[in-house]
Image (cartoon, rainbow, N blue to C red):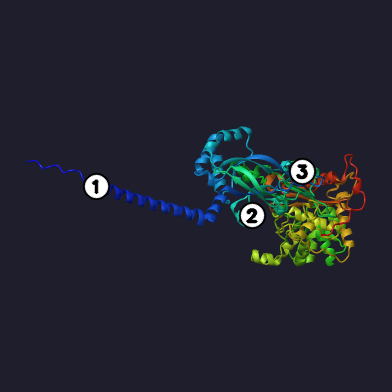
Amino acid sequence: MPQPIPLKDHEHDARLVRQRAIVGAVFVLLLTAVLVARMVYLQVIQYEHHSTLAENNRIHVQPLPPTRGLIYDRNGVIIADNRPSFSLTVTRERAGDWPAVLDAIVEVLQLGEEERALFERRVRQGRRPFEPVPVMFELSEEQIARIAVNQFRLPGVDVVAQLVRHYPQGEHFAHSVGYVGRINEQELKRLDAVNYSGTHHIGKTGAEKFYEDVLHGQVGYEEVETNARGRVLRVLKRTDPTSGKDITLHLDLKLQEAAEAALGGRRGAVIAIEPATGGVLAMVSQPSFNPNLFVTGIGFKDYAELRDSIDRPLYNRVLRGLYPPGSTIKPQMALAGLDAGVITPATRVFDPGFYQLPGNTHKYRNWNRSGDGWVDLNLSLARSNDTYYYDLAIKLGIDRLHQYMSAFGLGQRVSIDLFEEAAGLMPSREWKRINRRQSWFPGETVITGIGQGYMLTTPLQLAQATALVANHGRWVRPRLLKDADGLSPEQLMQSGLLEPREPPDDLKVKDDRYWEQVTRGMVEVVHGPRGTARKIGERSPYLIAGKSGTAQVVAIRQGEKYDRNKVRERHRDHALFVAFAPADAPRIVVAVMVENGESGSGVAGPVAKQVLDAWLLDEQGRLKPEFSSAPPAQEAP
């Protein structure tokens, strides 16, 4: 018999529904209470913390890099300026997958793998968080348009207008003014992180590097309001940057061009100094290079060509070129002999064409193999007689010789306002003992007397040693800087922008007439009937005090003669010439070195004469009026 179907208990079901409703309501109330408590915690208790975070996400402080100071020559011709340029920047934190963004940039701008590698290298360089990194400079209008159209594919990428360094004179001042380049990681560690925020370039060589603190200026700031994408909506507060100081150098563009033309494309160096002030009027190292290539980052191929060139265009021959000075040091040797009392102006030496040490059969040859007969001091300079100075070197001895030549600044840094200067070498007994572990031999003293052997100097040192003769021993340190926004170098030192640089003590001799005696001998070199450089003195409207020099590159065996046809071009002798003029009131000192030029008087001498003419003569070939009177008062060091 089937079971009866129980009737539904409506009261039980209603109770169950009410219980579930109560539980659900309690659960909802609990969740609501938790939510309200969380909101109270976040909006009341943590209000200041989160309001600060929100404000920081909306308000940003952006650095305003200062405008770099300009560089002028002494006549106001601009040497280094800033020109506007559109650059492509990448902010790594905003870009997300930045390698993919770089790939998109290369695709959009239709670039190659070399540019892609350069972009990645720049982005990976050390930089501050959220700082835009320039990856490409000087964008064209077409490139800017391509970036704008594809902006949605390029998060963190912006086109910004900025000033980029430019050198309108190109190669003329590459070795003196130098160039700026991108700040690398090593430089970033030692720089003032605050003052260089927003700045991407720094002086790398030359005056750009030495006067970095003067040219850079002080950074500024602005507080800006941004949206969620980081786009600036408005500027809330601004502190303007302080531009760097404009500097004026002693360099003269026309004289620089004249010196380069005088070299005629040959490898060599020319430096011209104003003896009264120490101002460097011209500094030429040939061959040169275009410094603009380095400003925004030189390509691998272009740099390899400069670096691997056999002519070494990146090498500053004026400051770093080390060459035997040859006979150009004979005026300084003569002064040393006079001051030491081992010779007088009337001292004579017989020259048969060679010199021999007592008890030694080795012959130290004079350049004139037939000899000059009896030679006094004046004739020894005019004829550049080697035998006279062989004998003088032995009379002085290496100890006194080293002492006097060092006092003229030979074999040591002159400390011009550039960082790249080499020291050279003025040998001594101690030097040879330490570096060669040998004793000093008399024969080495003999050849040191004519600027050969171990002795190495730079063209700058030769110019400074000649300036000491022109100034009668008064030491004026060579320098490029004339002023910075009207402030002299001394005022910049007092303000702390430059480190104090005191020149060495003046060179004192026992009798000031020695200076005039040596100067007369140097005048005979150019204007005397037997002078080695008398050709350049013909019909000159002013007196030149000069000295030629020829420095061996490779040694010649005893008894052999120099034959240029048997020597490779780069093994031929170097040609040197130093001079100052007018001889009775010096206004300019010139040192010339022509690599493998062979003849100091025949090759380097005419170069020096062209430089002197360019500075002292007017367009009609007459001495300029300002150079026909006494020299200006000398500046205090």
Query: What amino acid is at disc 3?
Result: Ile
How far apart marks 3 and 1 lie (CA) works out to: 103 Å
The label shown at residue 179 is none
Q: Which-is-in-front pick, marks 3 and 2?
A: 2
How far apart marks 2 and 1 lie (CA) works out to: 80 Å
Q: Is residue 618 left or right of residue 593?
A: right
Q: Determine the residue positioned at 57% across, 47% down.
A: 58
Q: How many marks?
A: 3
Mark 3 or mark 2: name the one nearer the start of the chain: 3
**Is residue 285 in view from this perspective?**
yes
Q: Secondary structure at mark 3?
A: strand
Residue at numbered disc 3: 78
Query: What amino acid is at disc 2?
Result: Val
| CB-based contact (under 8 Å), mark 3 and mark 2 | no
User: In this orientation, which residue lies closer to the viewer: 222 or 304?
Assistant: 222
Q: Secondary structure at mark 2?
A: loop
The label shown at residue 194 is 2
User: In this orientation, which residue lies closer to the viewer: 331 or 288?
Assistant: 288
Residue 603: image x %, image y %?
A: 78, 45
How far apart marks 3 and 2 lie (CA) works out to: 30 Å
Q: Which-is-in-front pick, marks 2 and 1?
A: 1
Residue at numbered disc 1: 11
Query: What amino acid is at disc 1?
Result: Glu
Q: Quadrant of the N terminus?
A: top left
